[in-house]
C-alpha cells in the first residue's frame, strides 16, 4: 500500500503516461473505430477521465462543477448503474467533443482530483483513487492495442513509433519445467492493489505437470501453418473451426504474405516476420489448435500461477485453458464498481502474464485478464504445458 | 460391463424405445425444425441409424450393402471426418427421404447389426455397439425435447401424450447439506460405460460448502419474476442481460400469461403452472440471476458430483457454475468418435443430473451434459449452493 | 362474364385442380419451407380456402360455423386488415394442422360455398367468388413452383411427375417484329375478370421498336455463360453485380454442372439441359445482363402488350424493363381486397405472359405479374427488344 | 456551352466552393461515417479530386506524377473499371491520409488541371473537365447533407453555421395547376451540360392532371402525424410499413419531441419546427403515405417536368412516383464514365427539383436525381398531384 503522497504522484504519472502514448497520433487517429472491440483513442481519454469524475468528484468533491453534462452519456462504458450511454458500436461515429475539448476535460478533472486529495485523504477516497488509477492503466493497454488496430488496418500502414520494441526475443534454452502434484494456494494475498476477481484466496489440487519455460515463437507457429494447421479440422474446437472458415483465417492478425514472404504489421510499420520472436496476435482457438498440433495443451490459470516464478513472463498475454469463473467465495464490490469484473464471467477465457503494451506496475502474478476466445487484437501469445 | 447377449437385448430395446417415443406423432411432426437447435424427429431416427451403419456396418460387416448412398449426406451430424453433410439449419427443409423410408432404413440396419453380433463378438465391436446405443439414448432425450419444442411453438398447442409426467414434485423438506473441505476424487471409475469426457479420474480440492437437497420450484421462481428479477441488470451477466433484452425474455420457456394467470405448455398440453413442481426450461443466465437474487450461487460440477449421494436427482438437468473443460489427462478417442465431446469444450456450461426426458440407464453421477448458456429447450433446472 | 352456374362449375373445377396438383406429393412434402419466398403446399391449400371463408362465408353465409378459430391466424397471408397472422418465415415450422385436417377444411368450405351460391347469386357475391377463384388459380401457380423448389433443393432430387412438360420448344424462325411509333391503349377493357392493377385503361406513346418473336433459349444463354457473362461487371446493374457475388451465382437456378456437362432439375427429375428449349429460372438481373450482352434490351410492359398479338407466348413469364407502378387513375379496391396489389407497387419489376405452371384461364394479354428483381423460382424467361 | 476560359473559372470556383463548405468543420468532423450512406467529408474532398486525376490527368497530362499511388484505392467510389477500392462501409474507419494531406492532394491536382487546360483545349478534354466539375458539384450536395447527418446524430447537436437558411417558406397561395392531356417531349435538348440519363429526348402521352403549385409544409405533415398516419397500414406500401415498424419511425428524420413540442435539428442547430416551412427529410414511403392520406398522389417525373415552368422549385428534392429507368434509346457513356448512371437503374425512385444544398448551376428542369425509397438524409420533400 502506497502513501497518499506517493499515490498522488502515481496518479499524476499515470495521467501523463496516457497522454504520452498519444503523442504520435494525428487528430484523425483519435476518432475512428474500425471494429466494435476497438474504441477510438479519444474515447479512452474521455472515459478514463469520466471514471474519476463520476466515482470520486461527483460524490466527494464539495461544490464540484461537472465539466459537461453530456459527457456522462458519451463516456460511460457499460455501467448500467450510472445511466444511459452511447452504444459501443457508435463510439466511432462521434466527431464531437473534439480532441482538444477532451484534453481540456482531462486537465480539469486531473486538477480537481489533485485539489481534492490534498484536502481529503480518507481510506475510502484512497481506495477509489487507487482503483481509478488501475482502471486508467488498463485503458492504456487497450489504447495502445486499439491504436495498433486503427493504423494496422489502414491501407497506408502508417508507423506509430520507431522506438517501441514489440518483439523481445527470449534467449533462454527451451525446457520443460516439472511441477509436483499437491495442494497449492491461488489468488492475491498481499496488501497491494488487486481486482476483486483475484480474491477469494483458495486452495487447488494440481496433478503433476510440465510447463515450458519459453513462449511459442513465430518460427514454431510457421511450422503449424506450413503443415496445414488451418486446414485440419481435427485440431480445432467446433466453434474455432467455424471461426476459421467464416473469416477465412490463415495466419495471425497483422500477418501479410507478400511475394511469398511473411510480413507483419508492427507499431514500427510493416516488417518481415521475426522468426525468433514470441508469436502474438492469435486467438484462443489458434493457441488451442497449435497445442493440439504439438501433442501438448495450454496450462490452466492455476498451473500458470503456481509455476510463474520459474520462468520469465510479461511480453505476451498468455492464453490459458481456464474459463473465466469466480473463485470460491468471490465477492463482487458494491455499487457501480461491482460491475467491473463479475458480470463478464461467462464465455471468456483467462489470460495470464502481461504484454509489451501493459503499463508499468499494472500486472502481477495473480492478475486475471480475460477475452472472448476469438479475439486477437491484444498482444496475445501462448506457452505450452503437458 | 454387460454380457454380449444382454448388450444385444439392450440394443434392440433401445432401438424400439426410440420408435415408441414417436408413436403419438403425425407424419408432419417428423419433418419440421422451428429453430436451429431443434432437429426434426425424422432426422433423429435416421441419424441414430446412420451412426450404426457408418461406424459398425461399413467397416465390420462383410458384404454389407449400404441402404442408400445419399443417406450419409443427409444424416451425418457434425463428423467432419466422415465427409460432407446437410448444414444443420437445413434439416427442416428436407421432405425426403419420407418417414416411411426412414423406418425401412431403421429396420434394415437393426437387422444387419443383429446378424453381425450373432457372428462377431469381438471387444472392439462390443465397445462400438455400446457407444452406438448410448448415442441413440442421448438422441432419445433430444427427440423428446425437440418434439416438445415443435408442438409447443405451434399456435394450436397440441397434446403429445396424456401420460408422461413432466412435473414430479419433490416432497422432501428443504435443507442445506453441508460438505466438508478436502480432497475429493472426480470422474468415472467403474467398468460400466461412460463417455471420454468423464475420464481422467482426478483429485480436486473443495472448500467447505452447502448444497440444497431439493431443486428450485416454480413457486420460488415466481417470486423472482414478481420481484422484477428480469428487470434488474445487476443480477445478470452482461451477456445474459443482452440476451434478456434482445429476446424480450420475461419468464421461462413455454410459460404464457393468460388473463393474469401463468400457464405452461407441457407434453400434456397447456396447464396452469404447478407451483410445487421443480422449475424447468430456464437458461444458465436465468439460473445464475436467480441464484444472485437469493444471495446464493450455483454449485460447481465437482461440488455436485461429490454431494450427489445425499439428495435425489434425475428430473431436471441442473445448471452448474462450471464451464465445460477437459479433465486433467483427458484423452479424446481416435478417429471420428473423437469428435464426440472434446471439440465442444469451449463456451458451454456443464449440466449434471438427468431429466424426465432422459432414457433409462442413460445418466449416472459422473455424466457431464453441456449446453450454451442461453439454451433452455431441455428440461433444465437448478439447485442452489452457498 | 360467366353465368352463375358456369361460375360455380369454374369454382369446383378450380378447387379440384389445386388438389390434383398435389397428388404426386408425400405428406412430408406438404410441410417444408426451404426459403422464405416458398410456402409449404399445405399452406397454399389452407390459405386459398381461408380466403373464401374470410371474405365470403363469414360475411354472407347466415349461420355459417367457422371451421376452426385458429385457422385465420395460421392461413392469413398478409392482410393487415384481417388481423394477426403467422409470420411468413414461420410457415414451414408448423406441423399442425395436419394435411388431413386441411383437406377436411377444404371440403367443408367448398361445400358451404356451393350451398351459399345455390341460394344467393347477387352481383356482389358473384364478384367475390370470381376473385376468390382467380386468387386460388394464382396460388396454383405458386404451389407448383414451390413444389419444384422443395423437391429441387432436396439432395435426393426426387421426380414430381413424368408427364408435365416444362420445356416446350418454340419452332418458329427467329425474327424481329417491328412496331410503329404512335399512341396505343394499354390496360384491360373487356367484361372478363381482371385485377385492379390492369385497370385505368390509358394511352401511352411508344417510339418505334422491334421485339423478338421467340423467347431466348438455353443455347443462347449458354453462350453468355461461356463468354464470361457472370464475370463482366459492366453488363450488370450495381445491385445485380452484388447479388451475383454475394450468392456466387454462375448459372440459372436448378442448373448443375456434372462432369463438365450442364444438367437441369425439372419436375421430371434431373435432365441434360435442352439447348433448344426456352431459358427459364433467371432473375431480372440476369435477363438484363444477357440483353446488354446481346446489345439489346428488354421490352417495356407496354411494348410487350402492344406487340403480343404478333407472337406466341405463355410458357414463361417474361421479365420486362418496367417497374411495377400504378396506371394513371388506378383505384385500389375497398377493404382487405384493396391490399391485393397496390401495396406492392415499389421495388418490383413487371413480368408479362404466363408459364407452364399457370392455370388455364388465369393469364391474359393485360395480366401484370410482378416480382423482386433477384427472384427466379418462377418459370421466368426473357424476350429481347431493341 | 461555356468558353474554355470560362470553364476553367467554373472549375476553380467549384473547387473553391467545396472547401468553403468545410470551413465550419473541426478536423474530427472530416473523418466519421455514422451510417453507410453517409461518407466522411474527407472522402468527398479526396474522391472528387481523384476523379480529375484518374480520368483527366493520368490519361492526358504528359509526364504527370501521381500524387500518391495508394489514393486510387482509398478514393475510388464504385468504378469497377478502375480497380479495387476501400469498401463503402469502411470509409469511416480510415484516419489516414490526414485531412491536411488531402488538402495537399487537392491543391496538387487543381494546379495540374489548370496547367493542362492552359495548354490543351481539345473538345474531349473540355467535355471531361465539364463532367468532372458537375461530379464535384454533385458531391458538394452530398457533402453538406452528410455533414448535417454527422452533426445531427451527435448527442451534442452542434451548430454547423448560423447563416445557411434551410427553410425558405413559400409565400404563394396554394393552388392546383391543371395540365392538359397530350403528347409532350421529355429530356434534355440544349447544348448545356447534362448527364446521360437525361438524354434520349422522347415523347410521352400524359392524361390530364393537376399539380400543386407549392410544396407540402411541416404543418400539413403534422396533421398526418397527429391523425395517426404512421399507424395506419393501409396508407403504406407493404415494404414501407415494414420499414416504419422495423425502424420505429414516427416522424421525419431530425425531428425530436421534447416536452410535448416538436423540434428539428437544422444546420443552425436545434430549433422549433417551422410550421410554414416546406417539409423535408422524408422517405419516398412517407411521401407516398402522406399523399394517400390526402386522397392525392405524387406526380410522375414526366408530369413534373412538363409542369415545372408553372411553379417555383429548387428548395427540396421532390419525390416522384416514377421508378428510375432508362429513357427510350438511352445510351450509356463508354468506359468508366458509363458506370455513372445506368447501373443504378433498378429499385430506386426519381426525385426532381433541387434543394438548399444543391450547388449553383447544378440542377435544371430535366435533372434526374434518384435514391432508394427509404432514404431521407437528403433535403427531400413532396408536391402533391391528382
Image: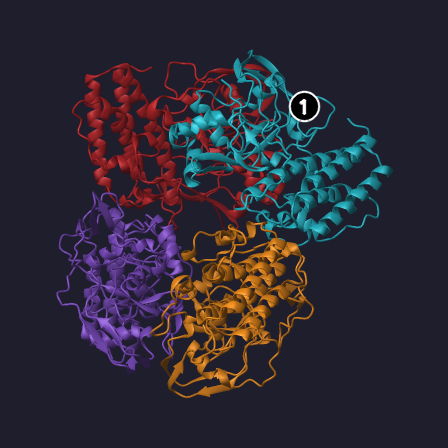
Chain colours: A purple, B orange, C cyan, D red
Q: From the image, which quarter does the C terminus of chain D lie in?
A: top right
Whether residue C322 sits left or right of residue D2 in the image: it is right
Q: Is residue D47 visible?
A: yes
Image location of residue A111, percent across then percent down: 23, 63
Residue D244 sits above or below residue D198 on the image: below
Image location of residue B306, percent across then percent down: 44, 83
Which sits in the foreground, B42 or B321? B42
Q: Residues within 10 Å of mark 1 (few under 14, many from 20)?
A: many
Image location of residue A312, percent across then percent down: 17, 70
In the figure, residue B29 lies in which quadrant? bottom right
Image location of residue B292, percent across then percent down: 46, 74
Residue at (61, 58) in percent of width and height: B103
Which sits in the foreground, C364 or C249? C249
- The residue beneath circle 1 is C188
Which sits in the foreground, A53 or A266? A266
Which sits in the foreground, B7 or A121? B7
Whether residue C236 sits left or right of residue C132 in the image: it is left
Residue A155 sits above or below residue A66 on the image: above
In the figure, residue D68 lies in which quadrant? top left
Total marks in image: 1
Q: From the image, which quarter does the N terminus of chain D lie in?
A: top left
Whether residue B266 sits left or right of residue A261 in the image: it is right
Chain letter, disc 1 residue: C
Residue at (48, 36) in percent of width and height: D280
Residue B160 sits above or below residue C13 on the image: below
Q: Is residue D354 visible?
A: no
Q: Secondary structure at mark 1?
A: loop
Amino acid at each position: 500500500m502506497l502513501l497518499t503522497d506517493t499515490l498522488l504522484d502515481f496518479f499524476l504519472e499515470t495521467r501523463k503516461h496516457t497522454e504520452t502514448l498519444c503523442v504520435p497520433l494525428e487528430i484523425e487517429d483519435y476518432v475512428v473505430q474500425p471494429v466494435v472491440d476497438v474504441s477510438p483513442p479519444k474515447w479512452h481519454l474521455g472515459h478514463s477521465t469520466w471514471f474519476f469524475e463520476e466515482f470520486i468528484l461527483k460524490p466527494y468533491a464539495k461544490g464540484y462543477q461537472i465539466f459537461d453534462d453530456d459527457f456522462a452519456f458519451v463516456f460511460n462504458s457499460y455501467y448500467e448503474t450510472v445511466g444511459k450511454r452511447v452504444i459501443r458500436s457508435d463510439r466511432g461515429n462521434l466527431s464531437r467533443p473534439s480532441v482538444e475539448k477532451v484534453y481540456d476535460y482531462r486537465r480539469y478533472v486531473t486538477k480537481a482530483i489533485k485539489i481534492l486529495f490534498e484536502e481529503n485523504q480518507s481510506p475510502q477516497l484512497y481506495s477509489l483513487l487507487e482503483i481509478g488509477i488501475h482502471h486508467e492503466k488498463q485503458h492504456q493497454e487497450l489504447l495502445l492495442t486499439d491504436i495498433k488496430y486503427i493504423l494496422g488496418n489502414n491501407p497506408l500502414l502508417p508507423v506509430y513509433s520507431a522506438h517501441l520494441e514489440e518483439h523481445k526475443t527470449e534467449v533462454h534454452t527451451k525446457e520443460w519445467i516439472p511441477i509436483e502434484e499437491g495442494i497449492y494456494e491461488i489468488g492475491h494475498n498481499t496488501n497491494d492493489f488487486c481486482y476483486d476477481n483475484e480474491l477469494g484466496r483458495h486452495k487447488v489440487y494440481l496433478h503433476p505437470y510440465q510447463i515450458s519455460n519459453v513462449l511459442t515463437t513465430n518460427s514454431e507457429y510457421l511450422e503449424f501453418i506450413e503443415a496445414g494447421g488451418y486446414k485440419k479440422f481435427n485440431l480445432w474446437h467446433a466453434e474455432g473451426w467455424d471461426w476459421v472458415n467464416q473469416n477465412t483465417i490463415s495466419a495471425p492478425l497483422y500477418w501479410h504474405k507478400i511475394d511469398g514472404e511473411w510480413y507483419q504489421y508492427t507499431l514500427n510499420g510493416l516488417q518481415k516476420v521475426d522468426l525468433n520472436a514470441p508469436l502474438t496476435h492469435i486467438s484462443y482457438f489458434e493457441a488451442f489448435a497449435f497445442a493440439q498440433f504439438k501433442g501438448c495443451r495450454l496450462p490452466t490459470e492455476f498451473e500458470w500461477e503456481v509455476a510463474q516464478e520459474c520462468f520469465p513472463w510479461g511480453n505476451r498475454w498468455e492464453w490459458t485453458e481456464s474459463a473465466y469463473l469466480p473463485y470460491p467465495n468471490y465477492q463482487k464490490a458494491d455499487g457501480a464498481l461491482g460491475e467491473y469484473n463479475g458480470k463478464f464471467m461467462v464465455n471468456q477465457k483467462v489470460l495470464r502474464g502481461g504484454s509489451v503494451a501493459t503499463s508499468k506496475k499494472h500486472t502481477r502474478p495473480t492478475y486475471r485478464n480475460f477475452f472472448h476466445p476469438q479475439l486477437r487484437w491484444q498482444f496475445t501469445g501462448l506457452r505450452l504445458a503437458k
